[in-house]
């Protein structure tokens, strides 16, 4: 299938993202942001949104994760070869960095929607003939943390290179450049030049989505670095619009130069408004691409009941009508599948009979992966003979505190096993494939972040879709999900009543105790009562009617892209 001129002419939305998780084995993502972008383009293709996407092609990926026998994370560069999978775009563009001309080319990856619509993704690369060796490394690895210089260069390639490449390829009808996080904000410089310095015109063609309420998650560069890489080529107006206490802030630039700004859950938008009070900030709650994340056994029972559910996920609101026995069988198939996979990858073998609690996410400290070990003997006593745990996740190579959490999980696991026979296993190299198995094969999906630091979270949505119950602090999407249906899982600790109180938002004592109480008094007794458990599983599934990227992309189409859609979707809330 070709990308023809009419497709280029009809394309009005450009989605610019540092990560896009197209496939588990294509290393263009590190975590939630990339998985969300992947789900976004999958839904956009299904819904025939006239979108083109831009990302970078990382020649050594993110990293492959291993653990040594003490639980120490080891990182390996990913060796991969995209030459056989993509079409290379013929004519490179040129970007000036310092006083050098850097050639940028792109690989083309096509996302094919349900009815055959093509959504092109261009993966920019400097690893091409004609560039000097040091230039070829510019698109080497995702979030290369060796220097801020590398980082800013990658963002110049993404933002400026992205817009320039689309122009050179004949995408001349883009009405909205959707900057998915501040990494792409330099796109505004190219637009500023394209529109002859007309700031209003730039603004009217940009939509900006922010993805983290954690201040350190917003890219900032020293002004001197910005001036060094751009020399005098950065317009004064742009420099001013990114100004933030003597630094250059990519989020601020994106917010200042956009017509529409949003956070990715209701609470996240509230927190973002506090960080950036001078802007209007809407919210569009994240979702997941349901056909991508549904397990085979679960999709079979959906297909049987609602043959058209992937095109019209609203029918999942009626999940309560699913047959108990079908659902039970599907879940057991998933659980056995996960456990047999686990047995092939570990010396510590899990048990099919026990309640299996999963926790998988990046090991940033705010996610508090080790909260449940706070009173480890109480945990051991409750779990003995009842419960086992499975963990997975990567710590950023530079995040020692995150790596220490991984070691703590190892050590706590040994203690629990030696003293209570309770198993805690940690799986290597969390990626989308492993995620698919975990979110469908566990019984319980655990999340224990410090409150109001989880922008949205999406793994819990994947669990719910597969009938796995969330046991989670109310933050991000789960604040909304639990409110919508409190039978879809459990909420840990104090709820939303006083978001300002740090003593409540990050109190390990209170949250750990709440976790133990729920586990002991609710989760374990409910598990022993099949009917009640299955009733909850069905309630969990019903959340997927809302928490999906079809609904989400339609919201972007309406609010951020101003597309007139034929069939606006209606949800019951
Ligand atoms: C879904 C997913 C995430 C994001 O989930 P969170 O709930 O935000 O942690 C991260 N990494 C992978 C591999 C995923 O599949």
Image (cartoon, helix red, strand yellow):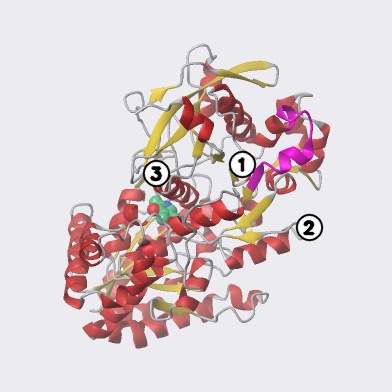
The Cα atoms of the two marked residues, 2 and 3, are separated by 43 Å
Towards the viewer: 499 or 116 = 116
Towards the viewer: 43 or 398 = 43
Q: Residue at x 43, y 31 (%)?
A: 60
Find residue 526 and report its image quarter.
bottom left
Q: Which residue is mark 2?
A: 278
Q: Is mark 3 within 8 Å of ligand 1?
A: no
Q: Is residue 159 left or right of residue 433?
A: right
In the rendered image, is residue 59 in sight?
yes
Label located before the other in sequence (2 or 3):
3
Residue found at the far top of this picture: 130
Percent across and percent down for residue 548 are 43, 60
Q: Which residue is mark 1?
A: 176
Q: Are marks 1 and 2 in contact (CB under 8 Å)?
A: no
Label located before the other in sequence (1 or 3):
3
Q: Which residue is mark 3?
A: 74
Label located before the other in sequence (1 or 2):
1
User: What element does badge 1 sit on?
Assistant: strand
Q: Is residue 110 magenta?
A: no
What is the magenta range? 192-207
Above or below: residue 44 compared with residue 9 = below
Above or below: residue 531 compared with residue 259 = below
Q: Quadrant of ligand 1?
A: bottom left
Q: Are marks 1 and 3 in contact (CB under 8 Å)?
A: no
User: What element does badge 3 sit on?
Assistant: strand
Foreground: disc 2 or disc 3 = 2
Q: Residue at x 77, y 41 (%)?
A: 200
Q: Residue at x 67, y 60 (%)?
A: 272
């Amino acid at each position: 299938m070709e990308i023809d001129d009419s497709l280029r002419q009809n394309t009005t939305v450009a989605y610019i993202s540092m990560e896009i998780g197209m496939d588990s084995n294509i290393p263009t993502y590190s975590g939630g942001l990339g998985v969300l972008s992947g789900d976004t383009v999958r839904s956009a293709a299904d819904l025939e949104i006239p979108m083109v996407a831009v990302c970078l092609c990382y020649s050594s990926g993110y990293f492959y994760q291993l653990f040594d026998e003490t639980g120490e994370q080891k990182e390996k560069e990913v060796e991969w070869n995209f030459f056989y999978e993509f079409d290379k775009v013929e004519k490179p563009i040129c970007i000036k960095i310092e006083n050098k001309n850097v050639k940028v080319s792109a690989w083309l990856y096509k996302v094919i929607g349900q009815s055959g619509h093509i959504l092109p993704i261009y993966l920019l690369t400097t690893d091409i003939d004609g560039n000097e060796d040091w230039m070829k490394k510019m698109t080497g690895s995702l979030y290369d943390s060796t220097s801020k210089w590398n980082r800013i260069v990658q963002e110049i390639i993404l933002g400026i290179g992205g817009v320039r490449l689309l122009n050179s390829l004949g995408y001349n009808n883009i009405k909205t450049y959707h900057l998915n996080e501040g990494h792409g904000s330099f796109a505004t410089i190219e637009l500023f030049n394209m529109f002859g310095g007309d700031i209003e015109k730039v603004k009217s063609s940009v939509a900006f989505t922010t993805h983290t309420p954690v201040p350190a998650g917003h890219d900032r560069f020293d002004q001197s670095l910005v001036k060094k890489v751009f020399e005098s080529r950065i317009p004064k107006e742009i420099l001013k619009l990114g100004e933030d206490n003597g630094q250059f802030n990519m989020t601020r630039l994106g917010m200042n130069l956009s017509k529409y700004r949003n956070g990715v859950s209701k609470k996240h938008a509230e927190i973002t408004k506090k960080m950036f009070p001078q802007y209007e900030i809407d919210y569009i709650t994240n979702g997941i691409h349901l056909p991508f994340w549904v397990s085979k056994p679960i999709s079979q029972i959906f297909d049987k009941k609602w043959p058209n559910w992937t095109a019209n996920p609203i029918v999942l609101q009626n999940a309560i009508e699913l047959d108990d026995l079908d659902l039970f069988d599907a879940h057991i198939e998933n659980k056995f599948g996960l456990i047999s996979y686990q047995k092939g990858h570990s010396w510590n073998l899990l048990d099919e009979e026990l309640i299996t609690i999963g926790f998988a996410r990046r090991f940033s400290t705010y996610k508090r992966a080790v909260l449940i070990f706070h009173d480890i003997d109480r945990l051991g006593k409750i779990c003995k003979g009842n419960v086992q745990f499975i963990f997975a996740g990567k710590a950023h190579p530079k995040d020692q505190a995150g790596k220490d959490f991984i070691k703590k999980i190892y050590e706590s696991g040994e203690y629990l096993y030696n003293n209570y026979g309770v198993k805690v296993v940690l799986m290597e190299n969390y990626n989308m494939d492993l995620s698919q198995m975990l979110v469908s094969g566990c019984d319980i999906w655990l999340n224990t972040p410090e409150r109001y630091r989880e922008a949205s979270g999406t793994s819990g949505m994947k669990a719910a879709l597969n009938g796995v119950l969330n046991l989670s602090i109310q933050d991000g999407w789960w604040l909304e999900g639990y409110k919508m249906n409190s039978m879809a899982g459990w909420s840990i600790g104090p709820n939303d009543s006083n978001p300002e109180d740090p003593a409540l938002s990050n109190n390990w004592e209170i949250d750990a105790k709440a976790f133990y109480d729920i586990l002991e008094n609710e989760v374990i007794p409910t598990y022993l009562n099949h009917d009640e458990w299955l009733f909850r599983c069905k309630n969990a599934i019903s959340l997927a009617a809302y928490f999906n990227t079809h609904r989400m992309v339609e919201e972007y189409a309406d609010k951020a892209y101003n597309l007139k859609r034929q069939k606006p979707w209606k949800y019951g809330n």
